[in-house]
Image (cartoon, helix red, strand yellow):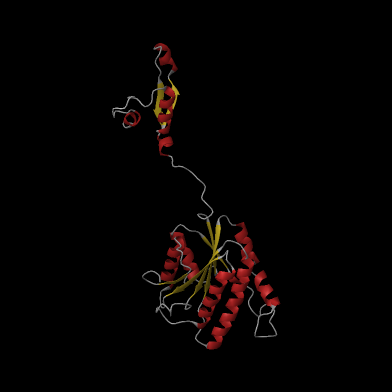
Amino acid sequence: EPDLFHEVVSTDGDDEALRLRDSGAWQEALQAAGFEVSPGSEHGEALPGACFLLAEWNSDLAERPETRSPTEEEQRAIFILGQAGKSKARLETMLAGALSRYGISSIISAPETAVVKAGNGGTRPKDKRKVSKATADAAALSWQPLIRQIDNAAGRAEIVFALEAATARSQDHMKALQSRLLALTGLLQSLGDRAVRVWIVAEGGARALAERGTACPAQTGVWAFVRTAMNEYAKLDLRLVDFAEDMPVALKAERLACLMSAPTEAREVVLTAEGMT
């Protein structure tokens, strides 16, 4: 290594010309520079009073990067709630592909294994003005397969919960809001005090305020609910995501994957073709 001598020998007019005046200091400097060092004993015996070191350049030692285990924040276990294999055009499926292009792996968890649908094995409350405790308990229990996956995952768990927009009829909006609030309540209660980041995609929940499209009544209700939940579930990192209206599904997936690859401090965003607001 031609620069090694200049690094270990001082020529700046100091009192001692040589900074490394003994074999031990030279051996340490050579090893730090990537040399394998051994004493040259046969030469030392031939020349009494002299000290020889045999140094062999080892590029593997010199260039090997420092290894370390990734931190828990760097290890990510992402669960996308959707129907695996249902349709390649769905946001969940395209998001998984977009994340993989950022080097991030994810698992699509089918909703039928995670959520008890109202009226299908659940308890329908007699009082339609509120959800019965039995129904809420059933919803909470329905998330247990996902919770077990989260507990067994290495690193920080993240969930993407994409809520499809309701149809135009007002009664559909009300039904959609009720079922989604039930599902979200069950999910949040099941997560409890776990440190999990949850991306809740509610299309139409906030874009009207950002002048990026029309509002969806069911999604604005979800948006308000999650805002309140952010205070009630302090250990959960809840994120609300909306998209500008008429964005292609592929672009939505790409924008969301980009955001997830480098999350900001913003907890409520509207993603657009140009970026986010």
Q: Tell me if residue 236 comes above or below residue 47 in the rendering.
A: below
The answer to whether residue 223 shows anywhere in this view is yes
State which quadrant residue 140 falls in: bottom right
State which quadrant residue 29 falls in: top left
Residue 274: % across, % down: 36, 70
Q: Tell me if residue 270 comes above or below residue 153 in the rendering.
A: below
Residue 193: % across, % down: 62, 63
> In percent of the image, x 44 and y 64: which residue is there?
259
Q: How many marks?
A: 0
Q: Considering the image in quadrants, where does the C terminus appear?
A: bottom left
Residue 208: % across, % down: 43, 80
> In percent of the image, x 57 and y 72: which residue is there?
229
Q: Considering the image in quadrants, where does the N terminus appear?
A: top left
Relative to residue 88, is residue 132 drawn left or right? right
> In percent of the image, x 50 and y 59: which residue is there?
105
State which quadrant residue 207 falls in: bottom left
110 or 70, nearer to the observer = 70
The answer to whether residue 114 shows anywhere in this view is no
Residue 175: % across, % down: 58, 83
132 or 166, nearer to the observer = 132
Relative to residue 186, is residue 100 drawn left or right? left
Instruction: Residue at the far front: name it.
Output: 15
Q: Tell me if residue 203 comes above or below residue 256 in the rendering.
A: below
